[in-house]
Image (cartoon, helix red, strand yellow):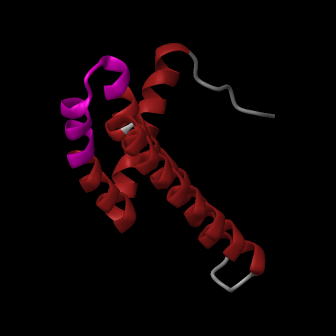
């Protein structure tokens, strides 16, 4: 039998608690997340400053936030793979490589968006 799941504000507060622990864990344990957060501390204010309209500001800021989101998901994949086992397995390596490729792709989107918004 499954235990009852919380509802209403209890569920919302527990979700915020889990999110907070996730952010803290990523900050403590993931150097890549800390580096990308440092980049975000420059890119986001710069995007707000350089954007000429609300749409341009959103286009300059949103891909940086997406980079952080993808890095959090990549870190979750890596933690799960490491939890399953530390021995080398082709699929485990592929899972980690795919997560890394997703982060790189999101950085590509960031660069392309900045290029298109600011120079074309």
Position in image of residue 16 (x %, y %):
42, 31
Quadrant containing the N terminus is: top right
Residue at x 41%, y 50% (from the top left corner): 111
Relative to residue 82, is residue 10 depicted above or below? above
Residue at x 63%, y 81% (from the top left corner): 86
Residue 30 makes an appearance in the image? no
Position in image of residue 44 (x %, y %):
26, 39
Q: Which residue occupies the extreme right position in the image?
A: 1
Quadrant containing the C terminus is: top left
Please state which of residues 95 and 59 is positioned toward the viewer in this rendering.
59
Q: Was residue 45 drawn as part of the magenta stretch in this picture?
A: yes
Q: Which residues are magenta?
A: 42-57
Position in image of residue 53 (x %, y %):
29, 19
Relative to residue 113, is residue 72 depicted above or below? below
Residue at x 34%, y 56% (from the top left corner): 36
Relative to residue 90, is residue 107 depicted above or below? above
Q: Was residue 44 drawn as part of the magenta stretch in this picture?
A: yes
Q: Which residue occupies the extreme front position in the image?
A: 120
Position in image of residue 115 (x %, y %):
38, 45
Residue 56, quarter of the rendered image: top left
Q: Which residue occupies the extreme bottom position in the image?
A: 87
Residue 102, quarter of the rendered image: bottom right
Residue 109 makes an appearance in the image? yes
Report the predominant secondary structure element of the magenta stretch.
helix
Q: Is residue 89 left or right of residue 22?
A: right
Please state which of residues 113 and 88 is positioned toward the viewer in this rendering.
113
Q: Is residue 81 left or right of residue 9?
A: right
Q: Which residue occupies the extreme top position in the image?
A: 8
Mark count? 0
Residue at x 43%, y 25% (from the top left corner): 13
């Amino acid at each position: 039998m499954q235990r009852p799941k919380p509802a209403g504000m209890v569920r919302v507060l527990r979700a915020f608690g889990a999110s907070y622990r996730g952010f803290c864990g990523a900050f403590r344990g993931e150097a890549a997340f800390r580096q990308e957060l440092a980049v975000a501390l420059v890119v986001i204010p710069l995007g707000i400053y350089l954007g000429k309209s609300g749409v341009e500001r959103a286009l300059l800021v949103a891909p940086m936030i997406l980079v952080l989101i993808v890095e959090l998901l990549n870190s979750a994949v890596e933690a799960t793979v490491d939890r399953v086992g530390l021995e080398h397995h082709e699929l485990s390596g592929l899972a980690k490589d795919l997560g890394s490729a997703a982060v790189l792709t999101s950085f590509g989107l960031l660069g392309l968006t900045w290029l298109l918004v600011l120079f074309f």
